[in-house]
Image (spheres, grey):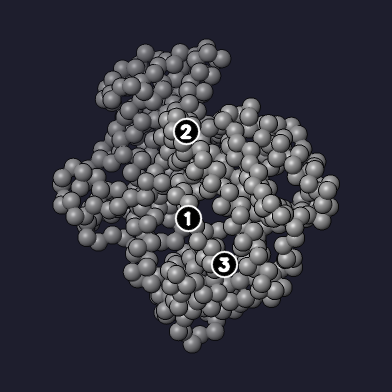
Amino acid sequence: MTHSVTEFTRFYNSPFSYWCSKTNKLVKEKKIDGTYKIEIDASKLTSKQLLAKAQEHEVVLKDKYRISEQLNVVDMSNKESTNQVFLDELDRKPDVIFQPYISSKDFVGRLDFISIVDDDLHIIDAKLSSSIKEVHIVQLCAYKEILEKITGRDVTECFLFLGDLQLHKVELGEYQRMYEDLKKEFADFNKTYNPELPPYPKKGEELKEYENAAKKIWVKNNGLELLYRVQAKQIEKFKINDINTVEDLKNTGLQKIDGMGESTFLKFKKLAQLLDESTENKILYEIKDSFLNGMRKPQKEDLYIDFEGYPFLTIGRNFEYLYGIWSIDENEDFTYYWSDDEEEEKTSFFGFMEYLLNHIKLYPDAKFYHYFSYEITSLRKSAQTFGAYKEEIERLIEKECFVDLFKIINSSLLIGASSYSLKTVEKLAGIIRTESLQSGKESIQYFEDYFYNEEYELKDLIIEYNKADCKNLFLLHNWLAKLL
């Protein structure tokens, strides 16, 4: 049976995810019973806007060939063509063929670009990624094999056209053996496919829209994958020592195992105990640093900041459409800067930075609290993009004005949860969210519906979500201060 190259790369990323998608495909085709259908997490599906951005990225290169370099480009993107149609086009000796659909006995696929140089063929695949990933190389290996089989000609060079709008040459040589092994594994997997026997989802796999399905299996098995930040290699080491579940790790009499530092082993053992004894409504924790990494208690001059960014508007960076600030003075003010386009984003960035700089002049000891590194990374990128406030941001960072509450929690507490996300640790502080919008993934979907589908009533819901994030940072900080 012939499979698509997309199916093959999904298998590379996660056999479990591939099994789920195959099962749902067979259900849709009514080849197996509908009871086998697996629920998906729609928020993890590839965004329509990202797909549109990827198509724009391909067109950028096509126009470069066609207009800037004045090459003869044959566009086959709208043709569900046969190999023979493609070969007929190839015989006409164009410079570039865009998106031909071709197939071999193993795979079918639509290549982005084939460049014809003398009698040799070059493959160019367009990716929005900022770097070359192994899965990209696996995909190129499959395309190379298809192309060489149906043309009888050599593919002598392969390139990736990345998000930086540059061509990056890729050497496939050392990956060919891995590709052949993976192809055999893929074929064997499909021969033995059983809709009742999913492969066990491993930690670190790219599960995509089947992440919740994987988590259900981990929960059912009390799997070690539930441990916070445990890696697949660490799980293997546990299993070598007959530790197969969270409960096994909690109850083991071992104090160390080969290949893992003693402190790391004991940390995971404690996490296993906390996780095993926690419930949905009561998450247990243990303080490992009573000084909380030097954290100070909330001061009236402190600010709590949170940004909302959209990743699919501009190639290479997030569009920061909302900057939020919560202050704990007598008014408990919430200030925000909203943007509907990149010009307004620049104005919002300038306004936000002026707010911080004026505030630090009035209150030199003020701290700006946030969660994870997103806000710092965002400010640096915006400073680079708009050519302003670079030095001011670096001075604020050097003065340690920005304080990441995640770093404090991660270094000071052990928590009986699989994630240390803000939504999880809020539960420790007894914070209950009442907003209809509950997650960052949801906020991206809401912004898309607001921005592209003109559902303008969603703007207020997004602002309320951001306000809750900012305010809850203060509430979390206040709770942490009581632990000092």
Residue at 39% across, 35% down: 143
Cα separation, mark 1 vs mark 2, equals 21 Å
- On the image, the x and y values in percent for residue 135 come to 45, 45
Q: Looking at the image, is 116 positioned above or below residue 264?
A: above
The reply to whether the C-beta atoms of the residues labelled 1 and 2 are less than 8 Å apart is no
The one nearer the camera, 427 or 301, is 301
Asked if one can make out residue 436 in the rendered structure from this viewpoint, the answer is: yes
Q: Looking at the image, is 412 positioned above or below residue 18?
A: below
Quadrant in the rendering for residue 387: top right
Cα separation, mark 3 vs mark 2, equals 33 Å
Q: Looking at the image, is 43 positioned above or below residue 163?
A: below
Mark 2 residue type: Tyr
Helix or strand or loop: what does disc 3 sit on? loop
Residue at 43% across, 52% down: 206
Asked if one can make out residue 122 in the rendered structure from this viewpoint, the answer is: no
Residue wearing tag 2: 456
Nearest to N terminus: mark 1 or mark 2: 1
| Left or right position of 134 against 391 | left
Residue wearing tag 3: 429
Nearest to N terminus: mark 3 or mark 2: 3
Residue at 45% across, 46% down: 442
Q: Name the disc covering residue 22, or none.
A: none
Quadrant in the rendering for residue 365: bottom right
Residue wearing tag 1: 434
Q: Give the residue furthest to the front.
A: 330
Mark 3 residue type: Ala
| Left or right position of 55 against 411 | left
